[in-house]
Image: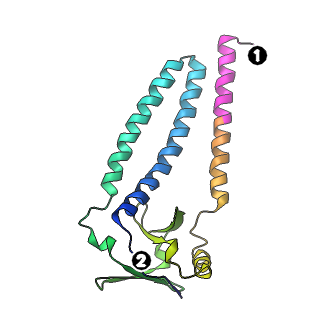
Amino acid sequence: MIELDEFEISRKEWLKLIFWHGYKTYCWTFVYVVVILTAVSIVTGDWFSLAFFVTVFVITVSIIHYFRYWRYSPSEQDSHLYQKQYVSFDTDKYHIRLEDGSESHILLSHIPRVDRLGNYYRLFMTITAFSPIPISAFRCEEDRKQFEVLFHDKMPSKADLQERIVVFLLFSALLLGSASYMAILEYGLDF
């Protein structure tokens, strides 16, 4: 059994975690859109449109991200989120007891994904809903390692990030190479 020291998470920390969760998606979307628009600009020879659409995209998606951020952000009235928590894990359950006496017991099999963001582990209950666990709440390094072993099949590996980067680079090379080839054929450019 892994027992954590009691902890509480402030609203400010909740807001940071929610912001960075959406920001990662925003960044991946941004780099893909820029590559696609760059390829279109190479083929058409219209670089003004690239600058215009990237600017519009950044502004539009930033506004959308801002509203999504506030939509999923906990309010000050969600006092249960800011109470002291007593958390433990056994081989098949995640146990939470709050300062007000309420308790939850969740089967580990009901947690589809676990990741690490900054100084927190996030146990996802749905695509967007997660329960943060501060790394500082682990009583010792062995408990933290045991936690990672318990959730090893639900945590992203470094290979997952490397795979995303390789896919992006291959996609970019293929798209930009094809666009350059089409531009050479259309405009008869010699290099």
Is 184 one of the magenta-colored residues?
Answer: yes
- The quarter holding residue 36 reads top right
Q: Please, is residue 130 above or below residue 45 in the view?
A: below
Measure the C-alpha gap from mark 2 to mark 1.
Answer: 63 Å
Point out the residue furthest to the right here: 191
Q: Position of residue 167 (x, y in %)?
A: 65, 46
Residue indicated by mark 2: 7
Residue drawn at x 38%, y 46% is: 65
Indicate whether 19 appears above or below 181. below
Query: Which numbered circle lies on residue 80?
Result: none
Mark 2 vs 1, N-terminal side: 2
Secondary structure state at the residue bearing disc 1: loop
Place of residue 58 in the rendered image (x, y in percent of width and height, measured from the top left)? 43, 35
Span colored in magenta:
173-191
Identify the coloring.
rainbow
> As shown in the figure, which amino acid type bears the numbered disc 2?
Phe
Q: Characterize the local packing of mark 1: few (<14), some (14-19) or many (20 or more) Cα atoms within 10 angstroms.
A: few
In this rendering, the answer to whether 64 lies above or below 163 is above
Q: Is mark 2 on a helix, strand or loop?
A: loop
Q: To which residue does mark 1 refer?
A: 191
Q: Where is residue 100 in the image (x, y as percent from the top left)?
A: 28, 83
